[in-house]
């Protein structure tokens, strides 16, 4: 979850007070003792033959044979939350990288009555699925953040932890996204299409290895029982912004 993109921004940047054990509030960064990756989590993203628009439908050919990972672990490593377990898959084309989330839920918590076309600051204070993506892993502290809520509200951020503030609210990836809510089965889905050019990537070559982490936030900020999940856990941190804990995204044919 990001706290913290303007995650997860418009107008003047103002940091709201944000309390949710065990994670820090906006603008606070966990200390990282060294710039080396500490996660062995991996997801394989397969090449798909053509581009397609997101619609939140997982029955499309693009996702039928995609590799996926599933997680239900609290971001710090415990406890487990099977009631909001999350599955995510990825594919890529020459121009885009795609992600699909399957999100179990026990309740839906979103901002009501707002235009989903407008970027939503503090989106992370409700239910959200998040991708933190680094296509140039040698730059550990520079990466990108993408968030989508069940009602298709969104936010994207460029993160550079060597700067203050560390998130660039003016950056816009023009990523596309769509969601669906299956109330019968208590699953909401989110599909993202991210132009690689927005991240200054000119081409993907089979065998490329990027760094990535996936997150879920569920419940309203400050509410009892609010939950935070991470695919690659962050036992030493109190924020999602610990890039040395990002797992590996392997882009293959």
Image (cartoon, rainbow, N blue to C red):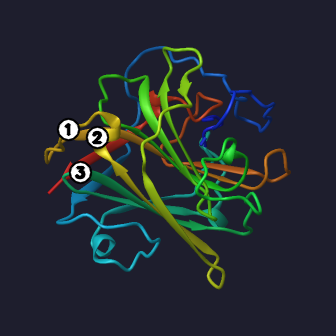
What is the secondary structure assignment of the residue under circle 1? loop
Q: Is residue 158 left or right of residue 234?
A: left
**Nearest the camera: 70 or 249?**
249
Point 72% across, 52% down: residue: 126
Where does label 3 land, which residue?
95
What is the secondary structure assignment of the residue under circle 3? loop
Where does label 1 land, which residue?
202
**Nearest the camera: 24 or 188?**
188
Q: Is residue 141 above or below residue 133?
A: above
Other residues around mark 3 within 10 Å, as few (<14) / some (14–19) / many (≥20): some
Q: Which mark is residue 33?
A: none
Where does label 2 land, which residue?
197
Q: Residue furthest bottom?
A: 184
Point 14% across, 44% down: residue: 205
Alpha carbons under labels 3 and 2: distance apart: 7 Å
**Nearest the camera: 216 or 81?**
216
Quadrant assignment for the C terminus: bottom left
Q: Is residue 155 left or right of residue 57?
A: right
Q: Is residue 62 left or right of residue 104?
A: left
Q: How far across and down, in percent of the image, does residue 179 sit?
A: 54, 68
Q: Sequence-wise, which precedes: disc 3 or disc 1?
A: 3
Other residues around mark 1 within 10 Å, as few (<14) / some (14–19) / many (≥20): few
Marks 1/2 in contact by CB < 8 Å: the verdict is: yes
Marks 3/2 in contact by CB < 8 Å: the verdict is: yes
Point 41% across, 75% down: residue: 58
What is the secondary structure assignment of the residue under circle 2? helix
Other residues around mark 2 within 10 Å, as few (<14) / some (14–19) / many (≥20): few
Q: Sequence-wise, which precedes: disc 1 or disc 2?
A: 2
Q: Is residue 32 left or right of residue 193?
A: right
Q: Is residue 91 above or below residue 64?
A: above
């Amino acid at each position: 979850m990001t706290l913290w993109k303007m995650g997860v921004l418009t107008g003047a940047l103002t940091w709201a007070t944000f309390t949710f054990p065990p994670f820090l509030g906006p603008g606070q960064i966990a200390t990282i003792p060294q710039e080396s990756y500490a996660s062995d989590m991996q997801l394989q993203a397969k090449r798909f033959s053509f581009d397609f628009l997101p619609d939140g439908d997982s029955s499309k050919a693009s996702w039928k044979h995609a590799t996926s990972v599933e997680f239900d672990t609290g971001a710090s490593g415990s406890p487990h939350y099977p009631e909001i377990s999350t599955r995510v898959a990825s594919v890529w084309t020459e121009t885009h990288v795609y992600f699909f989330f399957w999100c179990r839920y026990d309740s839906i918590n979103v901002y009501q009555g707002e235009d989903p076309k407008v970027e939503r600051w503090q989106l992370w204070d409700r239910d959200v699925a998040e991708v933190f993506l680094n296509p140039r892993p040698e730059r550990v502290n520079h990466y990108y953040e993408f968030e989508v809520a069940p009602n298709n509200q969104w936010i994207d951020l460029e993160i550079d932890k060597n700067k203050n503030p560390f998130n660039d609210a003016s950056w816009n990836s023009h990523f596309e996204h769509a969601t669906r809510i299956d109330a019968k089965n208590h699953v909401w889905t989110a599909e993202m299409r991210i132009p690689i050019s927005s991240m200054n990537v000119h081409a993907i070559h089979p065998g490329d290895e990027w760094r990535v982490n996936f997150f879920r936030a569920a419940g309203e900020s400050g509410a009892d029982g609010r939950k935070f999940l991470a695919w690659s856990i962050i036992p030493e941190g109190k924020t999602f912004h610990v890039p040395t804990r990002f797992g590996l995204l392997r882009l293959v044919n």
